[in-house]
Image (tube, rainbow, N blue to C red):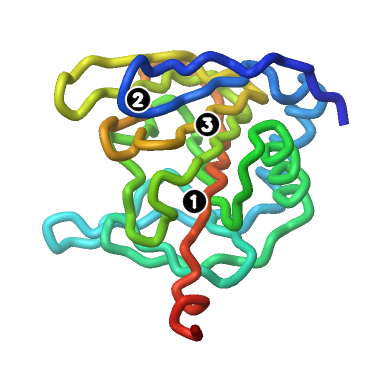
Amino acid sequence: MDLFDTDQPRNLLHKDGTVNYYERLLSLPDANHYLNSLLTNIEWKNDEAIIFGKRIVTRRKVAWYGDKPFQYTYSKTTKLALPWVEELLILKEIVEQKTGETFNSCLLNLYHDGTEGMAWHSDGEQDLQKNGAIGSLSFGAERKFSLKHKQTKETVSLILQHGSLLVMKGTTQTHWLHCLPPTKMPIKSRVNLTFRTIVDKNRFNNK
């Protein structure tokens, strides 16, 4: 596995959270390999959301994997984690070694082209570890990623590159929103892996 040795990146936020960006976590050949493998081997399904009481099916596709069949609820729909596939375990280990964090699950997104994106939101669901790290790996088309402070409305933006890693941690989700804006530019597909830590409620219930 060819990795680039990079120093600890600076925090992109000047207050109320921590966001680190590793521009080249994976070499170009490795990034290309994993992009093709993920497109083929992941059990992609169209995402669903309940908006104003109506079930909406998105063109964007998602997949949810984890150590256990964790339940994860967002947009008023619940997903059950599938068992890890080899590619995800390898990538999880790479992200954990780089960041010093540990993860037990991964939510994947497949954006077919630039018309698909993600509106402003924060990942503050009760299923997630509070103030836990989220490691976001990007493969495929480069896309703009933006963060917006909930009170001051100031924004921070960057371009997520093929094979890069973005890590949000600390109080970022409490104070900042983030989005992937759609674009009219003719771009190809992008796969995004967001490694997360789900709180195992059964572990606490059995005590």
Q: Which residue is mark 1?
A: 62
Tell me the amino acid under the disc marked 1.
Answer: Val
Please, is residue 4 above or below residue 137 in the view?
above
Toward which corner of the image does residue 6 lie, by quadrant? top right
3D distance between C-alphas at marks 1 and 2: 17 Å
Residue 182: assigned label: 2
Residue 80 located left or right of residue 1: left
Residue 182 screen position, x and y as percent: 35, 25
Instruction: Please identify, in this view, whether the residue under mark 3 or under mark 2 is nearer the observer.
Output: 3
In percent of the image, x 73 and y 57: which residue is there? 85
Residue 86 screen position, x and y as percent: 78, 54
Which mark sits nearer the N-terminus, 1 or 2?
Answer: 1
In percent of the image, x 60 and y 66: which residue is there? 82
Q: For mark 3, does the 10 Å Cα neighbourhood hold few (<14), some (14 to 19), or many (20 or more) residues?
A: many
User: Which quarter of the figure is the N terminus placed in?
Assistant: top right
Residue 207 located left or right of residue 181: right
Residue at the extreme bottom of the image, as rendered: 206
Residue 117 located left or right of residue 141: left
Which mark sits nearer the N-terminus, 3 or 1?
Answer: 1
- CB contact under 8 Å: marks 3 and 1: no
Please, is residue 89 above or below residue 37 in the view?
below
Residue 79 screen position, x and y as percent: 44, 66
Tell me the amino acid under the disc marked 2.
Answer: Pro
